[in-house]
Amino acid sequence: MDLGFFSVQANVASRWARLLSEYQVRQLQAKELAEGLSGGLILLHLDSVAPEMRRELIQGLESKQQLFVIMADRPQNDEGIRLLAQGARGYASTFITGSLLQQLLETVWRGDIWATPSVMQQLVKRLLNGHPSALLSVQSEKVGLAANLSEREQQVLDILMAGASNKQIARELQITERTVKAHISAILRKTGAGDRVSLILMAQERHAIH
């Protein structure tokens, strides 16, 4: 898949070019950005676009069904959720580490959403809003049975489905956050979900089917 990025700030552009050197990546000019990258993925530096131009640009990319990720100098939860709702497939810090950038690309390329942990947490809570706890328990159990989760993984999933953070799950089960992350990775692998949002959507779909 073609990979392009847009930033008018030399320090950002040079950093991204270095982090993405193993890919066939090119820096896009403003006209190329507006036209989109057919069949490719664009990393868009939000702070390189004038505030009054952002909505029109993002709507244009979305209308072309362009795969794009927004990178912001100062990521904010509300902004991230709004941009994801407008069609962005990812939302992250401009200064993301190389290893996380690699994970971001892999996540988006396989069709999942990438966002900062705090934004993802807010997305999960919004998805779960209005679903009673009894229903969440049923959804979680059906997903767990289908994926053949262990007893501990099922416990983690039950709490995760209530919109809890890793820290809250760790406190509830009296385990470390590192162990929680390991269990969640196992749950995502067994269910085939790419992230928490996909997992919640999977549970909701399974409930609707049954």
Image (tube, helix red, strand yellow):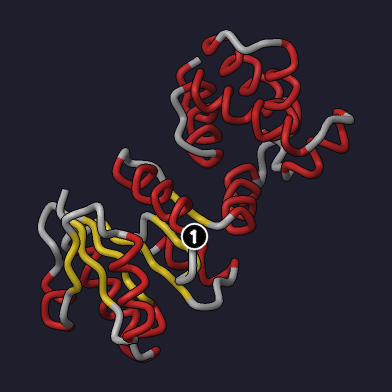
Residue 112 spot, x, y in % from top left: 39, 42
Answer above or below: position of 7 versus 176. below
Q: Nearer the viewer, residue 8 or 204?
A: 8
Quarter of the image holding residue 174?
top right
Find numbered disc 1 in the image and state the secondary structure of the residue it sits on.
loop
Q: Nearer the viewer, residue 167 or 61?
A: 167
Crowding at label 1, few (<14), some or many (≥20) Cα neighbours within 10 Å? few
Residue 63 spot, x, y in % from top left: 20, 64
Q: Residue at x 69, y 18 (%)?
A: 154
Q: Going by the image, does 191 lie left or right of 8?
A: right
Q: Nearer the viewer, residue 179 or 53?
A: 179
Q: How many marks?
A: 1
Answer above or below: position of 6 versus 62. below
Q: Going by the image, does 95 lie left or right of 16?
A: right
Answer above or below: position of 7 versus 177. below
Q: Going by the image, does 176 lie left or right of 41?
A: right
Q: Residue at x 49, y 63 (%)?
A: 96
Q: Looking at numbered disc 1 in the image, what kind of residue is underneath it?
A: Thr
Q: Residue at x 26, y 78 (%)?
A: 57
Residue 77 spot, x, y in % from top left: 59, 66
Quarter of the image holding residue 192?
top left
Answer above or below: position of 115 versus 86. above
Identify the residue under disc 1: 97
Q: Going by the image, does 114 lie left or right of 150?
A: left
Residue 99 spot, x, y in % from top left: 46, 51
